[in-house]
Amino acid sequence: MKYITTPIYYPNAKAHIGTAYTTILCDTLARYERLYGQEVKFLTGTDEHGQKIQESAEKNKVTPQQWVDKMSKDFIDLWKALSISNDDFIRTTEQRHIDTVQKILQKVYDNGDIYLGEYKGKYCVSEETFVTESQLVDGKYMGKEVIEVSEPSYFFRLSKYADKLLKYYEEHDDFIIPKQRKNELIAFINQGLQDLSISRTSFNWGIPINLTEEKNHIVYVWFDALTNYLTGAKYGTDEEYFNHVWNNGDIYHFVGKDILRFHAIIWPAMLMSAGIKLPDHIVAHGWWTVNGEKMSKSLGNVVDPIEEVEKYGVDAFRYFLLRESTLGQDADYSENQMVLRINADLANDLGNLLNRTLGMQKKYFGEVVKESGERTEIENGIYELYNEVLKDVYSKVEEANFSKALESIWKLISRMNKYIDETMPWNLFKENNLDRLRTVMYTLFDMIYKCSYLVSPVLIDSSKKMLNQLGVVDIKTNIYEIGDYVPNTKIGNASPIFPRIEKKEKEFDDELKIQDAINIDDFSKVKISVVEILKVSEVESSDRLLKFIVDTGKEKRQILSGIKHYYKEPKKLVGKKVLAVLNLEPVKLVGNISQGMLLTTEQKKNVRLIEISDEVKVGAKVKW
Ligand code: MSP
């Protein structure tokens, strides 16, 4: 049993491609696991309590409950539009969840890990997190406002779990995915873990705490939210189910890198305290930027996933997000890249393979696919490759590395395109070598059949269309049960599943045009080299110019540069390596010869010479 969860979303903002991405990753894992015969429970939902929600509701002049009812519905609709196959949707305002939170609080309290104290300090409402002085930059946390809070509070003894957490990381190498992220968690714990304030009294939109006589406390929104994963597994209400899903399940929590600490430090400590098994994997993904910039409302560059799906279709959109991102690293979204991917991978590699095959079949044998003749070495190699890919895809998927899984499938697709070029079915037909032609055509059909299944968790509808065109009616759910393509199948109608996006590409070409462009020949006339400054002096009767004697590696030269104003102590430049244009026509400036030009940068009216690191030798040429 694979238990796969997304973070639950704050239903107070519209989702963008970044938020959609976490859920698409989970959905892809869920679909691959099902395809490879695993039982899956896939949970998502909305995180509906907390100060931020209460404030949004007030601003919109509705009650918090009305607010979250509306907003969580928007999320449900979004997931439908993105073909998300979750089999549970949790809302933290549901009674089943409120009960679970109270149960776990009681457990942790009974274990002596909750005590009453006073919280005095900073709180960031926008991120719903307590903030220490050391996390502030210019009085802000991650660029967001913080407020002073001072109120009685329940605390969770997080500090007690520092060593246990470190030990757990050490003993479970696949707990944090990708592995490199473990280091930042270890560093954070080693700075010293403080106990965590887990209740608030200054507002009331949350789950009430009934541990002691102390009244008016509601649960801190993260303690509340993290518990949703237990609610989904029916903790404390259905022992058999909980055993199956949680205790015997392989648990994957997917998160963005910003919320890794909550999941890899606070959450495991809560579970340790309550005596519950820890999740098996926390998968942390990177950030999506747009055309190289951070996505933000103020920049007006927030990408709406629904708009993208309307433009390109849900399959291509999902394919792009998964193929274009390396797990754990930031990735960039641009329409340009999207169109290139659709045209290259989907229209050319995959779409053409199918189209060419159907076209040849019709021409050579009609609508019914013949049985294969005897396989040769080349076919044996292809079947071997398929078996490798079948295994490799699953192992990459288990590491949530979908870009690598897709790369692996595309190896097979490319192999098949090459197979057509190598075997040249048109020649076999011309030569009337029909035996061999039968084998080639059958192998093509069988491999496209198998590829359709391999891509089905990403290209959901398209894979069905592919199978339809191959004439397959009985679509299986388990890849180990698909068998081989059945000979004598009557193929369906061929029509392009991934049409090329021509118009767009032309628009991009136009966009790429640069005014006053020079060509590479023009550019390569300029000779730029590394020179060392041997001497600097002022030029009499000029308040701008400095006179440099430089070593070019071959000779000494004098170069004048108008940067006096920017260097108070020009002598300090002696010994520095900088860049100079050496084939510029010499000029005379206020009676001094200048045999070249030093290169500088300018930013906010500050000009600096471009310095080159010491390991580069004098005389080295600038190459491109
Ligand atoms: N409610 C909490 C999660 C509680 S889980 C017990 C939360 N919600 S969120 O709506 O703010 O974020 C949901 C997910 O979207 C997170 O995984 C977050 O990392 C991800 N992303 C938000 N902006 C993103 C990008 N620009 N790029 C990629 N993912 C981003 O946090």
Image (cartoon, rainbow, N blue to C red):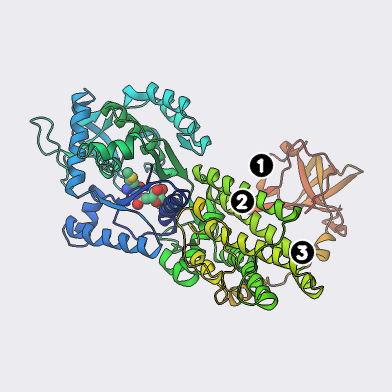
Residue 537 rendering spot, x and y as whole percentages: 78, 42
The C terminus sits in image quarter = bottom right
Question: Of tags 2 and 1, which is closer to the observer?
Answer: 2
Looking at the image, residue 413 lies above or below residue 424? above
Q: Earlier in the sequence, mark 2 or mark 1?
A: 2
Secondary element at image label 1:
loop
Q: Do the residues labelled 2 and 3 touch (CB within 8 Å)?
A: no
Residue 362 rendering spot, x and y as whole percentages: 65, 77
Residue matched to label 2: 408
Name the foreground residue: 225 vs 275.
275
Residue matched to label 1: 568
Disc number placed over residue 65 in the picture, else none: none
Q: Do the residues labelled 3 and 1 touch (CB within 8 Å)?
A: no
Residue 63 rendering spot, x and y as whole percentages: 16, 58
Instruction: Look at label 1 and name its amino acid.
Output: Lys
Is residue 193 left or right of 572 when viewed as pictured? left
Looking at the image, residue 262 lies above or below residue 6? above
Residue 189 rendering spot, x and y as whole percentages: 41, 27
Residue matched to label 3: 423
Label 3 to label 1, Cα distance in Å?
Answer: 73 Å
The N terminus sits in image quarter = top left
Label 2 to label 1, Cα distance in Å?
Answer: 58 Å
Instruction: Look at label 3 and name its amino acid.
Output: Thr
